[in-house]
């Protein structure tokens, strides 16, 4: 099974040059049934990664460009009166897909951002009192620009907590960037890609990740990290129980992608910066980018059992 995962990772690495770790984390996020937030400056491959993931995994893909005038109905859909039937007919919005790219999500107002909350948590949307189920699987990959850029709105804590992981891509190394300059356009490469796995295979991988063995010792280590975050100055109230569940799920996915059938503390440490940094320091006067520093401090100060 790990060979097939390696095939997926190899294809993605051929699109996102020099971003092996970020690519592996993104795949692990989907294996753990989570939503992904990619934060970085424009032009480093955020949208490209989302397109490539959808194409390789054979998922139905839609993109919504979040802007300051976006309305919730533009994402969710709305009911329109049909004169022939003399009743309102619901017209689904772009959120009714398997993978939704919420591009530059923090350029929309909080009202528009809130359109994603129920969908990300419950896999459904409620419009005019009627609940509509979303397709399975359902993933949101959102991109956002750094908060210091003009025209951005800060994501509220409730929205950030819906994202299982947050990644930063950064600039590629010189060698990778030179290969990119000499090679084919990334969009052309994605256009000619073929899905590697059927939907049933993805569901099977997700079930195996969920069932991957986690020892009591590893769970105690996760609990120690949570407890330390609640005692640390500058971390606000610390990490919630949901953050602990997210950390365990992502560690299981990381171990599965590595071809192992059990989680070790190193798996927890590998995914921790992407899972908990965006959950630390928000709403308490701490700068957003200090979440990484707080995460590193927590990991350094908690011994492995």
Image (spheres, grey):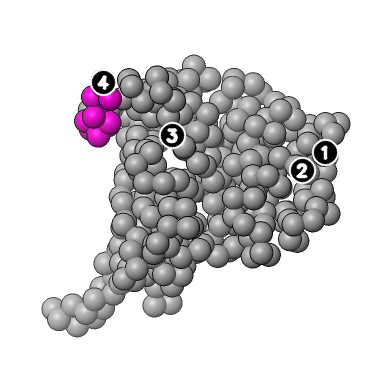
Q: Which residue is denoted by mark 2 in the rendering?
A: 298
Q: Earlier in the sequence, mark 1 or mark 4?
A: 4
Q: In the image, what residue occupies the spot 82% across and 43% down?
A: 224
The label number, if any, that marks residue 302 in the structure image: 1
Q: In the image, what residue occupies the spot 75% across and 42% down?
A: 297
Q: In the image, what residue occupies the spot 49% across and 58% down?
A: 147
SS assignment at label 3: loop
- Confirm whether residue 267 shows in the render: yes
SS assignment at label 4: helix
| Dominant secondary structure, magenta | helix
Spot occupied by residue 181 in the image (x, y as percentages of width and height): 28, 25
The label number, if any, that marks residue 182 in the structure image: 4
- Which quadrant does the C terminus fall into? top right
Q: Nearer the viewer, residue 67 or 213?
A: 67
- Marks 3/4: CA distance? 17 Å
> Quick check: 42 above or below 161?
above
Circle 2 packing at 10 Å, graded few (<14), some (14-19), many (20+), is: many
What residue span does the magenta drawing correspond to? 181-191
Spot occupied by residue 198 in the image (x, y as percentages of width and height): 37, 31
Spot occupied by residue 231 in the image (x, y as percentages of width and height): 83, 54
Q: Which residue is denoted by mark 3 in the rendering?
A: 171
- Marks 3/1: CA distance? 31 Å
Q: Is residue 40 magenta?
A: no
Q: Residue furthest top?
A: 3
Spot occupied by residue 207 in the image (x, y as percentages of width and height): 57, 36
Q: In the image, what residue occupies the spot 23% across and 24% down?
A: 184
Q: Residue furthest left?
A: 84
Closer to the eye: label 2 or 3: 3
């Amino acid at each position: 099974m790990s060979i097939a995962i390696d095939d997926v990772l190899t294809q993605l690495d051929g699109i996102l040059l020099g971003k092996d770790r970020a690519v592996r984390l993104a795949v692990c996020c989907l294996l753990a049934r989570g939503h992904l937030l990619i934060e970085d400056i424009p032009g480093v491959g955020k949208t490209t990664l989302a397109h490539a993931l959808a194409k390789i995994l054979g998922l139905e893909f839609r993109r919504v460009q979040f802007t300051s005038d976006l309305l919730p109905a533009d994402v969710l859909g709305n009911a329109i009166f049909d004169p022939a039937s003399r009743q309102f007919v619901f017209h689904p919005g772009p959120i009714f897909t398997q993978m939704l790219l919420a591009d530059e999500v923090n350029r929309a107002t909080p009202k528009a951002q809130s359109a994603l909350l129920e969908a990300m948590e419950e896999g459904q949307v409620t419009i005019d009192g009627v609940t509509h189920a979303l397709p399975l699987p359902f993933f949101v990959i959102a991109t956002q620009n750094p908060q210091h850029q003009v025209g951005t709105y800060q994501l509220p804590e409730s929205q950030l907590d819906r994202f299982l992981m947050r990644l930063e891509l950064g600039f590629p190394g010189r060698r990778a960037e030179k290969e990119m300059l000499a090679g084919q356009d990334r969009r052309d490469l994605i256009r000619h890609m073929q899905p590697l796995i059927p939907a049933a295979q993805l569901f099977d991988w997700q079930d195996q990740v969920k069932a991957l063995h986690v020892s009591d010792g590893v769970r105690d280590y996760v609990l120690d990290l949570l407890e330390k975050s609640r005692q640390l100055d500058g971390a606000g109230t610390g990490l919630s129980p949901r953050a602990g569940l997210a950390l365990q799920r992502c560690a299981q996915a990381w171990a599965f992608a590595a071809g192992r059938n059990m989680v070790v503390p190193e798996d927890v440490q590998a995914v921790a910066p992407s899972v908990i940094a965006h959950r630390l320091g928000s709403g308490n006067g701490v700068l957003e980018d200090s979440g990484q520093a707080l995460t590193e401090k927590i990991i350094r100060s908690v011994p492995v059992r």
